[in-house]
Image (tube, grey):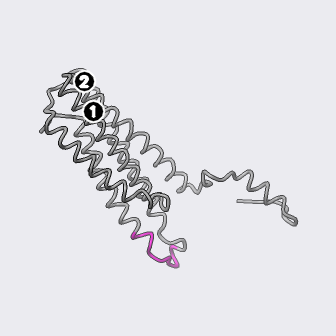
Amino acid sequence: VSGSLALLADAGHMVTDALALALSLFAAWMAARPATPEKTYGYYRTEILAALVNGILLCLLVMWIGVRALQRLQHPPEVLTGPMLVAAVLGLIANLVSGQILFRARVQSLNVHSAWLHVLSDALGSCGVIVAGVLIRFKGWRLADPVASLFIGLLIAVNSWMLVKRAVNILLEGAPTHLSTLQLVKALRGIDGVTDVHD
């Protein structure tokens, strides 16, 4: 309705967030299921797979936003700033409330942390849309809309890259990033009776 790509990008991000949260809830439910003789480690990795899928969806969204924003930089269209600003302010409020709910739980699960990152980048995206709307309304600078879209795309790209990187590291059974395996091996080799350390 408003003709704003920045608002559409922010809305698209929020839709993928809603899907990501639904996926996260499903993954958390799966992870809570008990281990079976066939799945001796249980279903915890379902959460990691959900985080990976979320990250990949966000990467695809970034590519779409980037292409559309570059087209609009060449031919910036008219934008209705009234509906744009109202929707962006409502989006910001929704994201701040959601972020507050997820803030404390984010340290307990990569899945919840990914949901919190989605919400945080959504809040920043809404701020970008508000700034663009104000610039268009009071300064007539129509390029603010595609510029804000690129800003939102950059926020999404950074978060999705961090998320995919962490999820892939876990799926590949990489060492946790806060540990140094070389120091760990050195410490274990220093124990009396330990000859060597493997795997």
Decide whether residue 176 is among the magenta residues: no
- Horizontal placement of 102 versus 182: left or right? left
Decide whether residue 35 is among the magenta residues: yes
In space, the residues marked 1 and 2 are separated at their CA atoms by: 12 Å
Residue 128: x and y in percent read 30, 36
Q: Residues within 10 Å of mark 1 (few under 14, many from 20)?
A: some
Furthest-right residue in view?
Answer: 192
Amino acid carrying mark 1 in the image = Val
Query: At 41% from the left edge and 58% from the top edge, which residue is drawn?
Result: 50
Query: At 51% from the left edge and 50% from the top edge, which residue is drawn?
Result: 166
Q: Magenta: predominant secondary structure element? A: loop
Q: Which element carries disc 2, helix, strand or loop?
A: loop
Q: Nearer the viewer, residue 186 or 195?
A: 186
Quadrant that contains the N terminus: top left
Residue 198: x and y in percent read 74, 60
Query: At 22% from the left edge and 40% from the top edge, which residue is drawn?
Result: 8
Q: For residue 143, which numbered disc appears in the image?
A: 2
**Tag 1 residue:** 131
Quadrant that contains the C terminus: bottom right
